[in-house]
Image (tube, rainbow, N blue to C red):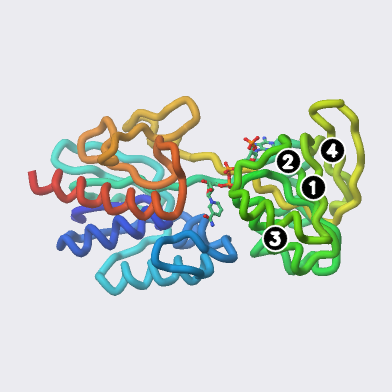
Amino acid sequence: MYDIIIIGAGTAGMSAAIYGLRAGKKVLMLEEKNYGGQIVNTPEIENYPGVSKVSGFEFATNLYQQAMDLGAEIVYERALKIKDDKEHKVVITAKHQYEAKAVILATGAKNRPLGVDREEQMIGAGVSYCATCDGMFFRGKDVAVVGGGNTALEDATFLSNYCNRVYVIHRRDTFRGESRLVDQLKKKENVTFVLDSNVVRLLGEEKIEGITVKNVKDHSIRDISVSGVFVAIGQEPDNKDFADMVNIDEKGYIRANEECKTNAQGIFTAGDCRTKKVRQLTTAASDGAVAALAACEFIQQ
Ligand code: NAP
């Protein structure tokens, strides 16, 4: 029996593991894919207090190493269900059942799709959700980045160093991301902003050859010739497997209070998967600490 099972080994989950382990608890992390979560795909982190510059991969690896050195266990299985057996919780995967006194849901969020025809079919044929992973394949080519948040702005900056031209397609004329990043991009000669516009079609049969964009104000339509489309329009949570145990809001986020407590006794939640206003690396790490300490207090009681 574990003290705490953490579902998800992103920044929130691994921070929770560190706090749980340092409080002397036996901790298991269940991770569906790879440790690290979304931050792994960020080329450079420049806003984590005390760390002026670090790559997302290095940050995640350090966090993982820190948790493992403290004695964390990690199993790469997707948690499909949580059962409440009164005395403890049972977390069920396709292969095993794991028992713990408390559970922390740190499932993060996944990339939001554009929702245009053939999007899924063209993944790997020009459609990508990760500029750091796939950017190199488009060296010297023209690409589009869709979105107006920090991810899109950082992706466009990264790609502008390798690609011939980067079109930034955003549905409004102001950006959700930091103005410092926008100013930086505006200085780049090979970056073109296509604002007030949505991507409505992917062009090309076997591989992407372009996109059709529609202006939301004057409804004009134009084709832009590109070899790659990097979709960076935010994330969506994926918590439906736990909807029978914890309250989830209309957008799919797990409802939680300041202490990261859900409505279910002994189940806590941390990071991007939970209701909150600011979803940042710092708030994910902070949630991890808060959720782990709340779980420790629950176990003690
Ligand atoms: P985000 O901040 O939610 O931005 C998503 C962007 O996509 C918005 O500009 C939004 O437009 C647009 N969008 C959403 N749905 C769309 C749709 N269906 N069609 C077209 N456009 C759509 O997402 P993010 O950029 O991935 O960032 C997520 C969080 O991580 C944020 O809190 C961000 O600050 C943080 N982050 C931080 C760093 C860093 O600190 N280094 C790096 C990356 C991300 P509207 O603006 O019109 O809604």
Look at the numbered discs 2 and 3 and tell me whether their residues touch, using CB distance below 8 Å.
Answer: no
Residue under pointer 3:
157
Query: Does residue 156 appear in the picture of this structure?
Result: yes
Look at the numbered discs 2 and 1 and tell me whether their residues touch, using CB distance below 8 Å.
Answer: yes
Residue under pointer 1:
193
Q: Residue at x 68, y 51 (%)?
A: 182
Circle 1: element type: strand
- Binning the other alpha carbons within 10 Å of mark 3 as few (below 14), some (14 to 19) or many (20 upward) gives many
- Binning the other alpha carbons within 10 Å of mark 4 as few (below 14), some (14 to 19) or many (20 upward) gives many
State the image coordinates of residue 265 (x, y, percent, origin top left). Answer: 21, 35
Residue 213's label in the rendered image is 4
* Ligand number 1: quarter of image: top right
> Whole-Å distance between the Cαs marked 1 and 4?
12 Å
State the image coordinates of residue 137 (x, y, percent, origin top left). Answer: 77, 67
> Whole-Å distance between the Cαs marked 2 and 1?
8 Å
Of badges 2 and 1, the one in the foreground is 1
Of badges 2 and 4, the one in the foreground is 2
